[in-house]
């Protein structure tokens, strides 16, 4: 039942995001809903209006792969959104025992060896580990209670995140999309559901993004940070998949740029802090 409701909400939200012009349709007068009508989606996907309505209503239908592909094309879904459609229709269950242990030795060694800010993130933005450069740039996730050790929690529940993340809006949208995809893939993960409930209750911004029912996967981009000693750092982000639901994020700068000079100053700050064991991390 929950999956049917999620499928209904996802299809409605995606339908509302596609304009008739984008779909190659003539936008006549009298349109009372944003985006496409149900009958327009059905026609574009090559299915009957009744069949599409039953699918959007979350009723028991079993569309073929070709029908799902046609719907994905009609709704102009991204690769992540197309995968979400398949997950909502086909379903998948995975238990919490499948998580990567927090003290995974390979991850710990990797983070120590990397010379740029780095963080390993697991299911639903759970922070598995971060190196000293990343902690200096953002926060020390190891100080968070276990149930709050999520990048999503820091972004939406910690007021300091908005001061640090100049590109907060982009990061927030991407993180919510990743979390939405994880909840769909792992419906039995009670920790993820508690996280969503807490953020929905405490953050209007999270609630607004969550209600969009969009999904995302880790992607390259540029993130801009603000550090009290260094100023602004515009760093390139690259994500590498270490396991099924575990990602390594690296933040680096192009050689010879102001960003590279700022990153070197960050290294100097961390080196100075590490030379004084009593000095706390930011």
Image (tube, rainbow, N blue to C red):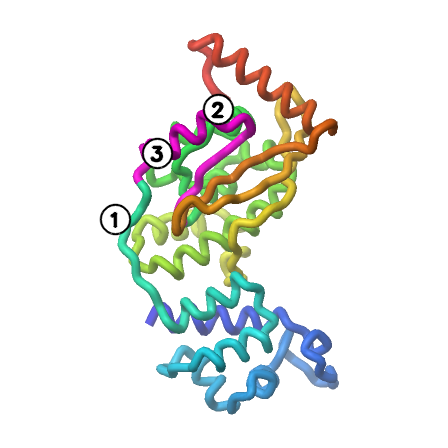
Q: Does the magenta stretch include residue 153?
A: no
Dot 2 corresponds to which residue? 132
Query: Does 253 sit left or right of 192 as displayed?
Result: right
Q: Where is residue 32 in the image (x, y as percent from the top left)?
A: 65, 80
Q: Which residue is drawn at 53% across and 44% down?
A: 239
Q: Residue at x 66, y 21 (%)?
A: 230
Q: Which of 251 and 44 is in front in this view?
A: 251
Are the residues tagged 3 and 2 within 8 Å (C-beta)? no
Q: Where is residue 123 in the image (x, y as percent from the top left)?
A: 39, 48
Q: Which of marks 3 and 2 is in front?
A: 2
Q: Dot 2: few (<14), some (14–19), or many (≥20) neighbours within 10 Å?
A: many
Question: For numbered disc 3, what is the local secondary structure?
Answer: loop
How far apart are the two marked residues, 3 and 1, measured between alpha carbons?
19 Å
Q: Nearer the viewer, mark 3 or mark 1?
A: 1
Question: For numbered disc 2, what is the local secondary structure?
Answer: helix
How far apart are the two marked residues, 2 and 1, measured between alpha carbons?
28 Å
Query: Does 12 sit left or right of 105 as displayed?
Result: right
Q: Give the range drawn in magenta.
A: 101-123
Query: Does 282 sit left or right of 40 as displayed?
Result: left
Q: Position of residue 93 (x, y in %)?
A: 30, 62
Would you place residue 41 above or below residue 186 in this image?
below
Q: Nearer the viewer, residue 110 or 76?
A: 110
Give the image quarter of residue 252: top right
Dot 3 corresponds to which residue? 145
| Quadrant position of the N terminus in the picture | bottom left
Dot 1 corresponds to which residue? 97
| Mark earlier in primary sequence (3, 1) | 1
Would you place residue 175 above or below residue 273 in this image?
below
Q: Position of residue 90 (x, y in %)?
A: 37, 72
| Mark earlier in primary sequence (2, 1) | 1
Query: Does 138 sit left or right of 2 as displayed?
Result: right
Label placed on residue 243: none
């Amino acid at each position: 039942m929950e999956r049917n409701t999620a499928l209904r909400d996802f299809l409605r939200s995606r339908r509302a995001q596609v304009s008739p012009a984008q779909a190659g349709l003539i936008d006549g007068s009298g349109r009372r809903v944003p985006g496409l009508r149900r009958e327009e989606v059905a026609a574009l996907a090559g299915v009957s209006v009744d069949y599409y309505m039953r699918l959007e209503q979350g009723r028991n239908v079993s569309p073929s792969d070709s029908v799902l592909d046609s719907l994905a094309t009609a709704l102009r879904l991204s690769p992540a959104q197309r995968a979400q459609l398949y997950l909502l229709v086909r379903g998948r269950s995975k238990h919490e025992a499948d998580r990567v242990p927090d003290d995974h030795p390979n991850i710990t060694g990797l983070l120590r060896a990397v010379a740029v800010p780095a963080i390993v993130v697991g299911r639903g933005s759970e922070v598995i580990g971060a190196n000293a450069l990343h902690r200096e740039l953002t926060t020390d996730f190891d100080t968070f209670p276990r149930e709050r050790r999520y990048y999503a929690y820091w972004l939406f529940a910690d007021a300091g995140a908005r001061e640090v993340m100049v590109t907060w809006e982009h990061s927030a949208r991407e993180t919510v999309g990743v979390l939405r995809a994880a909840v769909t893939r792992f419906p039995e993960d009670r920790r993820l559901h508690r996280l969503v409930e807490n953020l929905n209750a405490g953050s209007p911004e999270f609630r607004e993004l969550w209600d969009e029912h969009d999904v995302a996967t880790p992607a390259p981009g540029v993130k801009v940070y603000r550090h009290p000693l260094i100023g602004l750092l515009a760093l390139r982000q690259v994500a590498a998949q270490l396991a099924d639901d575990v990602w390594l994020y690296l933040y680096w700068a192009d050689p010879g740029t102001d960003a590279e000079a700022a990153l070197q100053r960050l290294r100097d700050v961390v080196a100075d802090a590490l030379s004084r064991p009593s000095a706390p991390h930011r």
